[in-house]
Image (spheres, rainbow, N blue to C red):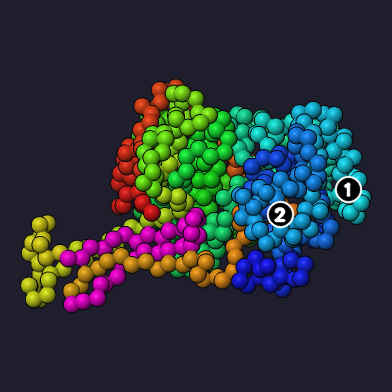
Amino acid sequence: MNASPLVQTEPSGKAKAPAARVQVAEPFTVVIFGITGALAGGKLLPALFSLWRNDYFPHSFVIVGVGRREKSDAQLRADLREAAQAHGGLPAELGEAWDRFAASLFYHRADFAVAEGYPALAGRLQALEKERGLTGNRLYYLATDPEAFPVIVEQLADAKLLHREPGLPWTRVVIEKPFGKDLASARTLDQHILRFLREEQIYRIDHYLGKETVQNLLSFRFGNAIFEPVFNRRYVDHVQITMAESVGMEGPRAFYDRAGALRDVVQNHLLQLLAFVAMEPPITLAAKEIRDEKVKVLDSLSPGDPGDINRWVVRGQYGAGHMDGEPVRGYREEEGVPDGSTTETYVALRLGVETWRWAGVPFLLRAGKRLAERETEIVVGFKRPPLRLFTRVPRDGDLGDRTCQCMDVCKCAIAQVEPSTLVFRIQPDEGISLSVSAKRPGMQLALQPVRMDFRYDESFRQAMPKAYERLLLDALRGDSTLFMRSEEVMAAWGFVTPILEAWHQQPSPRFPNYAAGSWGPAEADGLKDGCQRGWRQP
């Protein structure tokens, strides 16, 4: 069956690769810690299956899942097939192809914290690699609770399963977010892991960086001479970055209640998006040059006064409300959430980027659960034209060639220039739109906003790779461009940690302070003061 209208398949069920293809050149082994979790079943294995089916993999490879439960290889394959069908979008008709893919999928039982399980893992890997003719190239993926990250890396090193020295066979480790819970813990984790791995071997993943529109930010900005010159303080009034979720609590409740929206979303997703919007052109598109420019942006973030944090940061927690006409519970009523929890499910903040390009331009960031719509987007709001040419235009025949004399109470005005906006839609419908003012047809000179819209699904008649597909392929190829370097993580935590500390020293607002189905606390509207437009409600 075809993966998309333009993807042809061979009789085996695997998709034929187009002529130009970026593939994994060498045989490899992927070892996934936390194979029985939701991330592995819903995201990682469907992504690996899609890469295999579309011929991105070499002929020989092995995937070994590590978990604490008793399970056979056959049971793991059946469980992951069921999870992929339920959460990963695996069509039922691809079951036969999945079975061929799953022949390279194996299970190893081990307690992540117990050293005795790792020599057995080493023996299992060596046996499988010898059987399949593999050379020992290994990608370890830590899809576990964050507390297990340092333990797993140390135990792998003690069992001689990590090769620190450059050369073949290669060893790489993908670490899921969150990387620490504040600046101090992130530094401790980083120092611990760097005892056993080189920086180039560590792939700190943020799945948002695998989304097509995020990657297209670079192409759009630096590949179009008409846009790059206006991405600066002279023409841009403000920038908004929104990650709105309509869902409430999904996934691990305990983790989210410990983390909150600031740690879970702002420290990684939103600050990474900001870095792509505000960075300077890199010398080349190599990973080092791109990440160098992102670090400069994160180092240039200018927060408000930590002593008056409520003037530039707003936090909220949703209460009961309605979504799609149906009543929904508040956060504190969700299953597994402690009574009286003060965890924020919404955060909005205003900050600056103190570079020559962006000095004085407000950056407005917000993220929240149980908001009115599911939408992630970047909005670049441009300034109004400097002249008031269109603010007072007489009706036909009213004044002839005479100048309007109505002054500030002009009743002749029928046109108003709205500021132009450039919107990068990241989800759910990826694309880019530009809003400009144009004359409305008719005898009067009346302006109204019009939108020029680009959508991936309409412009490119082919399926877009999902975020984890792109990132896993890059990790297997050794391309770290879309992964976070140590300096990026520390710079982001360096900005976020003072906010956490200030919150810790003051009582939380009277939660809940926004209703499910709304756009968050009313106090967030104050962050837009001085901007020519308010929050854009998609």
Tally of marks: 2
- Region of the chain picked out in magenta, as a range: 414-443
* Circle 1 crowding by C-alpha within 10 Å: few under 14, some 14–19, many from 20: some
Q: Position of residue 196 (x, y in %)?
A: 78, 36
Q: Is residue 259 left or right of residue 439?
A: right
Q: Which residue is mark 2?
A: 48
Which sits in the foreground, 452 or 222? 452
Task: Locate the N terminus and report the quarter of the image it occupies.
Answer: bottom right
**Quadrant housing residue 37:** top right
**Is 533 situated above or below 494?**
below
Give the residue at x 10% y 70%.
Answer: 403
Residue type at numbered disc 1: Leu
Q: Is residue 475 left or right of residue 162?
A: left
Give the residue at x 74% y 66%.
Answer: 13
Q: Position of residue 180 (x, y in %)?
A: 61, 33
Which sits in the foreground, 293 or 437? 437
* Circle 2 crowding by C-alpha within 10 Å: few under 14, some 14–19, many from 20: many
